[in-house]
Image (cartoon, rainbow, N blue to C red):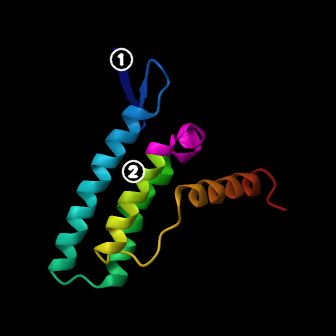
Amino acid sequence: MDEVKLFGVFFCNTFSSAPHINHLLTVCNQCLFLLSQLKNHGLALVSLHIVYQAIVQSKITYTLPVFGRQLACMDISQFAVLARKATHCGLVNTLPSMREYYDQLLLLFKWMQNPA
């Protein structure tokens, strides 16, 4: 067995993030298509942004603490393409970069360790 899916995260025997990143990009692109269909059917932009955060952004940030340091430049550029698609389609106004997502998560974890 070369890959295993555990809690929605794909791990491979080489500890590469590539299988999970490829799966994540495929799923997120499918979600963007779904959102574009919802937009075509008249869903308000505010609602589209909420749905985007729920089904796309949450998938991206879910495993970022695990794979964040392993992301290659190619992976980051693929996520940038995904973000451009979302903004070009008018699904969201602005999106943070992968680095900004990662920095936000690090701040959250630091705060969780010492909330005072």
The three-letter amino acid code for the residue at tag 1 is Asp
Nearest the viewer among 78 and 96 is: 78
**Residue 99 % position (x, y):** 59, 55
Position of 99 with respect to 114 (left or right) is: left
**In the structure shown, which secondary structural element does the residue marked by tag 2 occupy?**
helix
Tags 1 and 2 touching, CB below 8 Å: no
Q: Residue beneath label 2, please?
A: 78
Look at 39% across and 74% down and name the residue there: 50
**Residue 51 % position (x, y):** 34, 70
Position of 44 with respect to 75 (left or right) is: left
The three-letter amino acid code for the residue at tag 2 is Gln
Q: Which residues are magenta?
A: 63-74
Residue 99 in the magenta stretch? The answer is no
* In the image, residue 52 above or below residue 109: below
**Residue at the far top in the pictured view:** 1
Q: Image quarter for residue 4? A: top left
Q: Quadrant of the C terminus?
A: bottom right
Residue 50 in sight here: yes
* In the image, residue 18 above or below residue 12: below
Look at 47% across and 19% down and name the residue there: 14
Position of 94 with respect to 41 (left or right) is: right
Residue 65 in the magenta stretch? The answer is yes
Q: Image quarter for residue 24? A: top left
**In the structure shown, which secondary structural element does the residue marked by tag 1 occupy?**
loop
Position of 100 with respect to 51 (left or right) is: right
Label 1, label 2: how far apart the Cα atoms are = 24 Å
* In the image, residue 17 above or below residue 95: above
Look at 56% across and 37% down and name the residue there: 70
Choose the circle earlier in sequence order: 1 or 2: 1
Q: Residue beneath label 1, please?
A: 2
Overall secondary structure of the magenta stretch? helix
